[in-house]
Amino acid sequence: MKYIILFMLLLFALAASTQVVTKSADQIRDEIARIKNKTNWESDAEADTANAKIKRLAKELIILGDQQRAQKNGKMNDSANNEEIKKGVEYRMQLWDKMQESAAKGESSDIDFAEPVKNEIVEEYKDDQSPKIKNGKYLEVMTVLCIDMSLPTVQRTIDQMSSFKGIQTLVILGGKNASRVDLADLLDRAALYPLKELFILNFQQFVSTIPPQVANFKNLTTLSLVKNNIKTMPACISSLTTLKELYLDANPLTGILPTIQSLRSLEILGVVKTNIPATELVSIKNELPNCQIIAK
């Protein structure tokens, strides 16, 4: 797990800005590299200390990168926008931690993937877990949307999906005990989102295939299909050539090479608790030498 966290945070950091006012991104990356090189990763204590430092530095880089992209898109560099960026970064990092906990536990996992975002919703909308958002400005600037199919009022959020304009991260959850879902309908509703990250998590037996609409999101860099019942890799994935991170953990997959060998930008492939044989993992590494394969 310590290596998984390290690689993920480093790759998040690589996407960040290269110029900042106080400390440059390159300086922060150099600091991360020094920590990595000086740490004895066989020591749990040293690894935990190093990972904590790397997580803090990586968070700084992600925030800087998001701020620069916001400025390029014409958003003001003010305290309100910066606070919104920080919240988004914190959520993504919390979600990643939840994903790793669940993948490690496999079928026995009872992790609630939605917990980070639901905590925020409950804080702002204490009387309703699936609020009807009426603030038009909020609908325009919000970049993260969570659809938790286990909520009894989830249809309110689904009905409003077309009103969101800037969703870059879409999280579709089966909830703690998994739920039924019409993925094709949800992805059709999200068709106009400038989506970069798509998470379809914890539907277990209720999701055995991924609809072809996934291929419509040509700018996806992260796709996570963790803890479903996918036995065969959907062919539509092969067209997502911008993918950098693909997580297939906790699915009964037996082979994926024909579908992913065209994903030349792939940097991380998660296949923890799948049935993919070691021989195929070797072949994948030969086809995609720059991809880090996380298999255990």
Image (cartoon, rainbow, N blue to C red):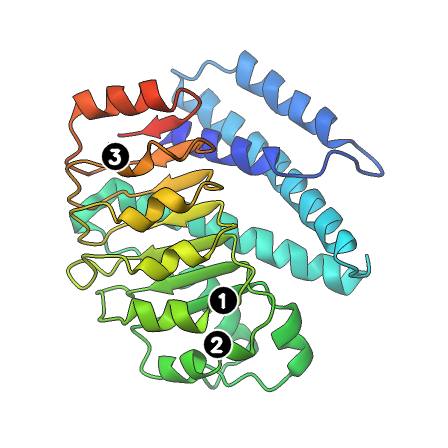
Between the residue at mark 1 and the residue at mark 2, the CA separation in whole angstroms equals 9 Å
Between the residue at mark 2 and the residue at mark 3, the CA separation in whole angstroms equals 34 Å
Is 168 left or right of 212, judged from the image as shown?
right
Q: Residue 122: x, y in percent?
A: 48, 75
Q: Residue 4: x, y in percent?
A: 40, 32
- Upstream in the sequence, badge 3 or badge 1? 1
Query: Could you say which disc has been placed on residue 145 in the image?
Result: 1
| SS class, disc 1 | strand
Residue type for callout 2: Met
The answer to the question of whether label 1 and label 2 lie on touching residues, with beta carbons closer than 8 A, is: yes
Residue type for callout 3: Pro
* Disc 2 target residue: 161
Q: Identify whether 267 is placed above or below 44.
A: below
* Disc 3 target residue: 258
Q: Residue 29: x, y in percent?
A: 65, 26
| SS class, disc 3 | helix
Residue under the image location 51 percent in, 77 percent down: 162
Question: Could you tell me if residue 52 is visible in this image?
Answer: no
Q: Nearer the viewer, mark 3 or mark 1?
A: 3
Is 94 left or right of 287, judged from the image as shown?
right
Label 2: few (<14), some (14–19) or many (≥20) C-alpha neighbours in 10 Å: many
Is 136 left or right of 116, judged from the image as shown?
right
Label 3: few (<14), some (14–19) or many (≥20) C-alpha neighbours in 10 Å: few
Q: How many labels, in total?
A: 3
The residue closer to the viewer here, 100 or 237, is 237
Residue 276 sits in quarter: top left
Q: Where's the N terminus, which quadrant?
A: top left
Label 1: few (<14), some (14–19) or many (≥20) C-alpha neighbours in 10 Å: some
Residue under the image location 18 percent in, 23 percent down: 278
Q: Nearer the viewer, mark 1 or mark 2?
A: 2
- Upstream in the sequence, badge 2 or badge 3? 2
Between the residue at mark 3 and the residue at mark 1, the CA separation in whole angstroms equals 32 Å
